[in-house]
Image (cartoon, rainbow, N blue to C red):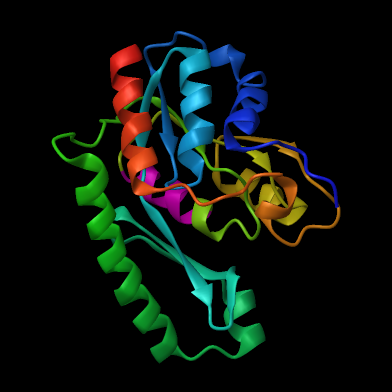
Amino acid sequence: MHALFADRPSAGHALAEYLTGYVDRDDVIVLALPRGGVPVAFEVAQRLGVELDVFLVRKLGAPGHAELAMGALAGGGTLVRNDQVIYGLGIEEETIAQAVDAERRELARREGAYRVSRTAADVTGRVVLLIDDGMATGATMRAAVDAIRRRGPAHVVVAVPVASEQACRQMRLVADGVVCLNTPSTFFSVGQYYADFSQTTDDEVRELLRRAVITK
């Protein structure tokens, strides 16, 4: 399987070309799903000349299948379950509860690590571009969309460089707009479509958020 993108920044450049209708609009904000979505979203926000912030969501990896999401948890306590995976693998409720507790603690840690003195951006009445480096099951993005809806945006647009066909179909049912640059017919993981899919660090996230503030 050949890589579609050299790395996340290059994927962001490609994605931005499909979002030029949002250039220099004060009512638009780019929200990145950390950590991998931040380098992608940074390039999009810079190209569009709009505000960048993060929106914290944590995938609940299935036991023994870390890349497979049995659900996802977003800020504010929004929980999305992937019942197909849960029932298919026979995952017990106690296992799900333990994963939720662990990821809730990680959400709190990252909120403190990324925000520092920053407050979460107000999305009320705005067009939100939700960006990640890709979607496999779509569970993580679904949790983000559901949580953002509670904050009163005008529109929620999901945009990713690569995704499974199933994930894109599901997003079209819950988002106001969906941009999936590539939907390979055979899809196992997001990382297989990047030549460099090394982990994005907390320090890199903080640096990109700092640069976005300075250059905006």
Magenta stretch, main secondary structure class: helix
Q: Which residue corresponds to the image point at 41% horizontal and 28% vertical from the top-left?
A: 154
Q: Which residue corresponds to the image point at 39% horizontal and 77% vertical from the top-left?
A: 99
Q: Is residue 214 left or right of residue 189?
A: left
Q: Is residue 63 above or below residue 66?
A: below
**Farthest top residue in view:** 24
**Quarter where residue 212 is shown:** top left
Quadrant occupied by the C terminus: top left
Q: Is residue 117 above or below residue 199?
A: above
Q: Where is residue 13 shown, x and y percent of the image? A: 62, 23
Q: Where is residue 190 shown, x and y percent of the image? A: 67, 53
Q: Is residue 209 above or below residue 145?
A: above
Q: Is residue 196 above or below residue 138?
A: above
Range shown magenta: 142-150
**Quarter where residue 4 is shown:** top right
Q: How many marks?
A: 0
Q: Is residue 14 left or right of residue 54?
A: right
Q: Is residue 81 visible?
A: no
Q: Is residue 89 left or right of residue 63?
A: right
Q: Is residue 171 visible?
A: yes
